[in-house]
Image: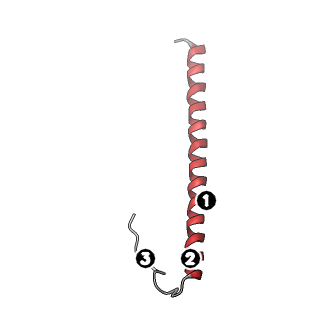
Amino acid sequence: MNIPELSTALANVQLTNQVGVAVLGKAMESSETAGKSLINMMDRSMELSVNPNIGSNFDMMV
């Protein structure tokens, strides 16, 4: 067993995991921002609506 090669391989795996977690964190942050923007847009459109009761509720399946 070659200890230096093993150490390098483990360091590379750790770095890859850290990068993956960072990318996922940015994706979550971006999704959260987009969701908040969508909610704000819906709230503003309901305020500007002539009849605010129409379309105020909707069913959504995920």
**Numbered tag placed on residue 1 in the rendering:** none
Which colouring convention does the figure follow?
A: secondary structure
Judged from this view, the residue extending furthest toward the front is: 50
Look at mark 2 in the image and give the residue it sits on: 45
Percent coordinates x, y for residue 62 in the rendering: 40, 63
Q: Quadrant of residue 60?
A: bottom left
Q: CA distance from mark 3 to mark 2?
A: 15 Å
The structure residue drawn at horizontal position 55% and vertical position 66%, both measured from the top left corner, is: 38
Decide: marks 2, 1 in contact (CB < 8 A)? Answer: no
Instruction: Using the image as rendered, state which of residue 48 and residue 59 is in the foreground.
Output: 48
Decide: marks 3, 2 in contact (CB < 8 A)? Answer: no
* Residue at disc 2, secondary structure: helix
Q: Check disc 1: other Cα within 10 Å, few if <14, some if 14-19, many if 20+.
A: few
Instruction: Using the image as rendered, state which of residue 41 and residue 18 is in the foreground.
Output: 41
Tell me which numbered mark, 1 or 3, is placed earlier along the sequence. 1
Which amino acid, by three-letter code, is at mark 3? Phe
Percent coordinates x, y for residue 12 in the rendering: 58, 26
The structure residue drawn at horizontal position 56% and vertical position 18%, both measured from the top left corner, is: 6
Look at mark 3 in the image and give the residue it sits on: 58
Which amino acid, by three-letter code, is at mark 1? Thr
Look at mark 1 in the image and give the residue it sits on: 33
Q: Quadrant of residue 16?
A: top right
Decide: marks 1, 3 in contact (CB < 8 A)? Answer: no
Which numbered mark, 3 or 2, is in the foreground of this view?
Answer: 2
